[in-house]
Image (spheres, helix red, strand yellow):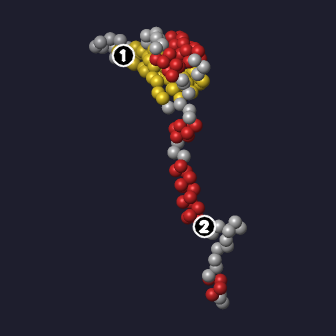
Amino acid sequence: MPTSDTKSKKPAKPADGSARSASQNEGEGSKRSKGAKGSKEAKKADGHVILRIRVRAYESKILDASVKQIIDTAARYDAEIVGPVPLPTEIKKYTVNRASFVYKNSREQFEIRVHKRLIDIVNPNPNTVEALTNMSLPSGVDIDVKML
């Protein structure tokens, strides 16, 4: 026959003397995970500002020459450069009928390739930013600049 002592067992306390339940420990862990919201806040806390430059062009030779010009300009002002990182080439394909009315099976295919590169400049000084904005690049080169 069971006695009343076996029914009212208390959980053993941890060796460090803290008597917290499992739900209290889980709540504390979730508070810690909310503290680090993302990499942007961590970058701002470290004081790093990143100038992200995306360069796009139809011809890869003109694109590489423009990227080299950007890197040389940034290096002249002692900026820390990451890249150029080649991004995937965007290919758009178009299929067109050769004849206007009949001969549906006779078609031509064309494609447009957009080559892309990514350059990061870490902690750019004002002289570097000014030199990059005043730089002239060949036509057919598209540039997107973002501050992270």
Which of labels 2 and 1 is toward the front?
A: 2
| Residue at (65% x, 88% y) in the render | 3
**Which residue is label 2 attached to?**
20
N-terminal label among 2 and 1? 2
Evaluate if marks 2 and 1 touch, with contact meaning CB atoms under 8 Å apart.
no
Q: Seen from this angle, which residue lies furthest left?
A: 101
| Residue 96 badge | 1
| Residue lying at the far bottom of the rendered structure | 1
Which amino acid is tagged 1?
A: Val
The residue at 50%/16% (across/down) is 131
Image location (x, y in percent) of residue 17: 68, 68
Numbered tag placed on residue 68 in the rendering: none
Q: Amino acid at mark 2?
A: Arg
Q: Residue at x 56, y 34 (%)?
A: 47
Residue 119 position (above or below residue 69): below
Q: In the image, residue 81 lies at what x, y percent?
A: 59, 23
Q: Where residue 41 sits in the image (x, y, percent)?
A: 52, 40
Nearer-the-camera pick, 137 or 116: 137
Residue 115 visible in the snapshot: no
Q: Viewer-proximal residue, 19 or 129?
A: 129
The total number of labels drawn is 2
The answer to which quarter of the image holds residue 64 is top right
Q: Quadrant of residue 10?
A: bottom right
| Visible residue check, residue 143 | yes
**Disc 2 to disc 1, how far (Cα)?**
72 Å
| Residue 9 percent across, percent down from the top left | 64, 79
